[in-house]
Amino acid sequence: MARDKMFVCNNCGNEYSRWMGKCEACAEWNTLKEVSKKDIDVIQDIESSAEGYKAGELSKLSDGDFEGKRLKSSFDEWELVLGGGVVEGSVTLFGGEPGVGKSTLILQVCNDLVNKGYKILYVSGEESLAQVGGRAKRMGVAGEKIDFLDSVYWEQIEKIVEEGDYNLVVIDSVQTLMSSKLSGGLGSMVQLRYCVARLTQYLKKKNIAAILVGHVTKEGEVAGPKILEHMVDVVLMLEGERSGDLRVLRSRKNRFGSVDETGVFVMSQAGMKSVDQVSKMFLKERKIGIPGSAISVAMEGTRPYLVEIQSIADRTVYGTPKRTSVGLSLSRLSMLLAVLGKRAALDIYDKDVYLNVVGGFKLEDRSTDLGVITAIASVVLGRPVYEGAVMIGEVGLLGEVRRVKGIKKRVKEARNMGFDKIIVPQGSDVGEENIVEVGVVYELFEKLF
């Protein structure tokens, strides 16, 4: 007998025949929502059909040869992260916190593409024509070349796309998409799942590229079910603090290129500007001669960046010392503090420790471990680090300094920025002068302080 209703998790899309307080798939509480039989039938209809696709054919894997054309813009950082531009017929999910500049960057990319002869449809479900048009005018965007639709209904969007000969469709934002065939509310899992499935199916058949703009939750994930990330070809995230002007573009998923590259922009009144000398920007307000500051080199994809790591430590007034980190995971900071206490005999057990990566940059590269412990040791010992020193190396639990990839590129970037004392892991085969090699953490302190 067919079910009259079911319960679907708004976070991961897992389905249940009865309500449960906790989703067994994603372990989230109170995310199960009731879905009517009408909505179930509509979703099953689209997911079970092969509408718009050719029948499957048996072939050899060697017969496949991807030759997808790309929509190339003049934004070097955007192109770098995507691997050479947006691929025709692909679907890109572009996420970021509200106010971080997603719509601004997309408008600039659209402006560059229409000036190259591409035809674009910009669909906004949140802002009116006056709002988007006003922003476009302020930024100098050629608004007369971009078609605009203020609608949330997929059926209307599909009709407009069918009548036009578009190369790219932008949906801002994907959380506003809905279908008149469903009874689920705006932004619900049912609406998102159905509309994105239809959109992906339809645009791939037409070989039209799409960019879906989406907000993120406070945990940093794209709002809505995680299933969206599996349905699209590319997932981009724009990061940055709204109070600052630095923006970092990362790729979480890319079926047509690398996910290691990072793009850096500066937000201004006229829009986003690509940053050519990233290291110079991160170090432009550096203070010299103050304990608690250290320079390291992070590698994002093929590009090295010099970053300043700052720390402060003070005697705790509570029973348990406080650890706070901005730009580095708290678990990594806790591990490095344990290494400092156990392997380097540094007295940090009764101190609150605060760490900050200047510029809002998030360190995911473990080669900056040496810079982190140097900054902490500097403030605890009350001794500033030599202003021309750069620390590169991963730190293990035994206190050993481990070698990292791309050491020659990192050293070259440090040299270009004027640093003359570069500390690297032992056996790093750099082949240059003024290179200091260290094998364990306490050797670093002997040669640095």
Image (cartoon, rainbow, N blue to C red):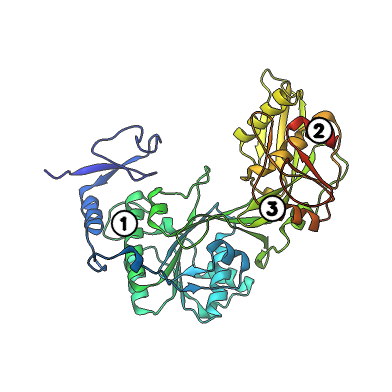
- Residues marked 1 and 2 touching at CB (< 8 Å): no
How far separated are the C-alphas under marks 3 and 1? 37 Å
Marks 3 and 1, the one that precedes in the sequence: 1
What percent of the width, then of the height, locates residue 381? 83, 29
Q: Tell me the quarter of the picture where residue 192 sits.
A: bottom left
Tag nearer the camera, 1 or 2: 2
In the rendered image, the residue lying farthest to the right is 289
Q: Nearer the viewer, residue 34 or 166?
A: 166
Three-letter amino acid code of the residue under disc 2: Phe
Query: Which residue is denoted by mark 1 in the rendering?
Result: 194
Query: Which residue is denoted by mark 2 in the rendering?
Result: 445
* Disc 2 packing (10 Å; few <14; some 14–19; many ≥20): some
Residue visible at 66% across and 49% down? 361
Query: Which residue is denoted by mark 3 in the rendering?
Result: 244
Q: Decide if residue 14 is on the left or right side of residue 349.
A: left
Three-letter amino acid code of the residue under disc 1: Tyr
Q: Secondary structure beneath disc 3?
A: loop
Marks 1 and 2, the one that precedes in the sequence: 1
Q: Decide if residue 439 is on the left or right side of residue 192.
A: right
What percent of the width, then of the height, locates residue 206? 35, 73
Marks 3 and 2, the one that precedes in the sequence: 3
Q: Tell me the quarter of the picture where residue 64 sits.
A: bottom left
* Disc 3 packing (10 Å; few <14; some 14–19; many ≥20): few
343 over 62 or under it: above or below: above
